[in-house]
Image (cartoon, rainbow, N blue to C red):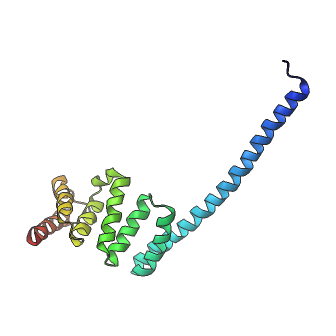
Amino acid sequence: MTITEPIRKYILSGIVAFVVIGLIVANVMASKQDEDFSSNDILYSQAFQMQAEGNYEEAWIAISEVIKAAPNSEVVNYLAGIIAANKGDVKQAAIYMQKILDINPYKVEDAIFMIQLGEIFVAAEKYEEAKIVLLHCQESGWAPEEIPNYQDHVAALLAQIENLQ
């Protein structure tokens, strides 16, 4: 069977139509994704700003919407954990902070994150987990500039755990 010139034109026209339709669909989907990203970014920024101002209830409402859209985002879960802890829901904060480690296991090398995680675990009465985290902080010998008495604070938290158990 030979392919004649008109058949070649139909095949080429079909391929061109397929590519053009694909580009149109991709463009429409990308613009929708851009809108979603933009609205989530605005909500995240609002949540961050409200949290910084101490308006934790409003911040929680905003970050809850972002969590629905980006449940596996490290930064979104971190902010949700910090907001939850600040509004007194330490059990929920512990869940978000633990999820961060599931998303990014290398956070165990972040001194600030680890002390926050230890504090939240202590507040949530998860003493065994807190002890593991705080011993890691102690063994690592971290001394970040942001927390000049870092090791003293770790030791105080470990002593608090010993007294509570």
Q: Residue at x 89, y 23 (%)?
A: 4
Query: Is residue 13 rendered to the left or right of residue 140?
Result: right
Report how many numbered discs are placed on residues in the image.
Answer: 0
- Residue 7 vs residue 104, the one in the foreground: 7
Which residue is the extreme one toward the right? 6
Considering only vertical position in the picture, is 88 above or below 22? below
Q: Percent position (x, y) of residue 27?
A: 70, 52
Q: Residue furthest top?
A: 1
Instruction: Specify the quadrant that holds the C terminus.
Output: bottom left
Determine whether, in the image, residue 114 is placed left or right of residue 16: left
Q: Position of residue 8 (x, y in %)?
A: 85, 28
Q: Residue at x 23, y 64 (%)?
A: 118
Q: Is residue 20 left or right of residue 108?
A: right
Q: Is residue 154 above or below residue 109?
A: below
- Residue 35 location in percent, x, y? 63, 63
**Extreme residue in the left direction:** 163
Q: Measuring 26% from the left and 69% from the top, which residue is drawn there?
A: 120
Residue 52 position by quadrant: bottom left
Relative depth, front residue between 136 and 111: 136
Quadrant of image for the N terminus: top right
